[in-house]
Image (cartoon, grey):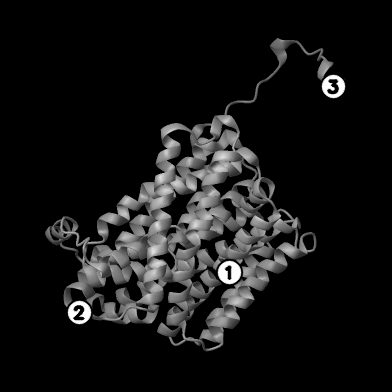
Amino acid sequence: MHSTQQTDEPASKKRAMPPIPAWQLALAVMGPGLVVMLADTDAGSAIVAAQSGARWGYRLLLPQFLLIPILFVVQELTVRLGLATQKGHGELIAERFGKGWAWLSVSTLMVSCVGALLTEFSGIAGVGLLFGISPWVSILATVVFLVVVVATGSYRQVELLAILIGLFELAFVGVAIVSHPHGAAILTDMTHIPLGNKQYLFLLAANVGAVIMPWMIFYQQSALVDKGLNISHVKPARWDTAIGAVVTQIIMAAILILTATTIGSKNPATPLNTVQQIADALIPFLGLYWGKAVFALGMLGAALVASIVVSLTAAWGLGEVTGYKRSLAHYPFEAPWFYGVYVASLLIGAAIVLSGVNLVKLAVSVEVMNSLLLPIVLGFLYMLALKALPPPWKLKGRYAWLVGLIIFFTAALGVYAGVMGIFS
């Protein structure tokens, strides 16, 4: 037996592998959490943050920071599930609750992913129009770029490129700084929160819905597995998630501060439903360069990284239920269904956006749909954390109750935003 074989090499001559420095391990593990968080600040989320600042000044700024721990708690469950079970989210649902529930969950995921792509492509089209580029050119060029990126790269290469693209979102922070926000006004607004106002509560709920996306849960869990990580990497993976949560909310806060300082203080009634409207409203305050080019750069980075994430999520999620090969480690001819679903989701999103539909109404419908899906997605996430994890990592005790309350609160606000969106 292999277990009984001995080595003749003296113990004194054996060389132990030197331990990997903590910072090198952290850099090697970092990626899935940061990527999914950068994708979280997508075109739709940017519009919600812009509307919040323009209409309510800095009164929705405090919730942006309060959402950081909530976002971390939710996504940390995907870290535990992915690393401890080595399975994707849809695969775990099928294993624990049956194929029927898995198909329900993944079907809603597919709809959510296509809906998110509509928002991202709408944002990309809007950025192109700012510079006189036809939507056909900007969107089709984006589809070709995203197909080439995924079809020719490993997971690590795709992840690194997504991070580099997503970091363009920090342009929002730079623009917010040069807008010269007023410290006294920020403190005053943050301490006067109109919780009795229904319009304020609706935008508060919309901000919660803009932070917790259904596809985020599927993506991070699948990405951890595809990257080859295991439970020994849980600590740096948590740090990756925590850093990402802080970064994405800083970006959301920057967009809110920018619009509150400019549009909110001068013309709060300005409609901000598209990228073009936001940029056009900012140009008089920030000048042609800052108001157009830099803001467009941040929006393009957000939309591109989100497009990569949601299309990969669709391909991973469907594969977890059907069983086809689903890894970026395979070449396209080795995993045709995986790459086929990825390309198909991009083409469907592009076709709908280029069809001439009303993109503003479409974006609102997508946000409403995502909000209404939160109870299903977060409910499965919580039940899996209770049932699918091995004892050392299973939710238990007071923390299990705390996580349950956070998930209930988040799902309730999502449903509220959805219902308000339907009947408003």
Q: Earlier in the sequence, mark 3 or mark 2?
A: 3
Q: Determine whether the residue tagged by mark 1 lies in a helix, strand or loop.
A: helix
Q: Tag 2: residue type?
A: Asn
Q: Can you give x and y, in whole percent of width and height, for residue 120 in the image?
A: 49, 72
The answer to whether residue 286 of the structure is visible from this angle is: yes
Residue at x 62%, y 41% (from the top left corner): 229
Instruction: Choose between 17 and 193: the one closer to the eye.
Output: 193
Name the residue carrying label 1. 111
Q: Tell us which disc is closer to us: 3 or 2.
A: 2
* Residue 313 left/right relative to 202: right
The answer to which of 35 and 294 lies nearer the viewer is 35
Residue 231 image offset from top left, x and y in percent: 59, 35
Q: Quadrant of the N terminus?
A: top right
The answer to whether the residue labelled 3 contacts the one labelled 2, judged by CB atoms less than 8 Å apart, is no
Cα distance in 3D space between marks 2 and 1: 36 Å
Residue found at the very far right of the displayed protein: 1
Q: Is mark 2 on a helix, strand or loop?
A: loop
Q: Which residue appears at 53% of the width and 81% of the height?
A: 138
Picture coordinates of residue 110 (x, y %)? Answer: 61, 66
Which of marks 3 and 1 precedes in the sequence? 3
Q: Dot 3 corresponds to which residue?
A: 2
Q: What residue type is labelled 1?
A: Val
Q: Name the residue under label 2.
A: 267
Mark 3: amino acid: His
Mark found first going from the N terminus, 2 or 1: 1
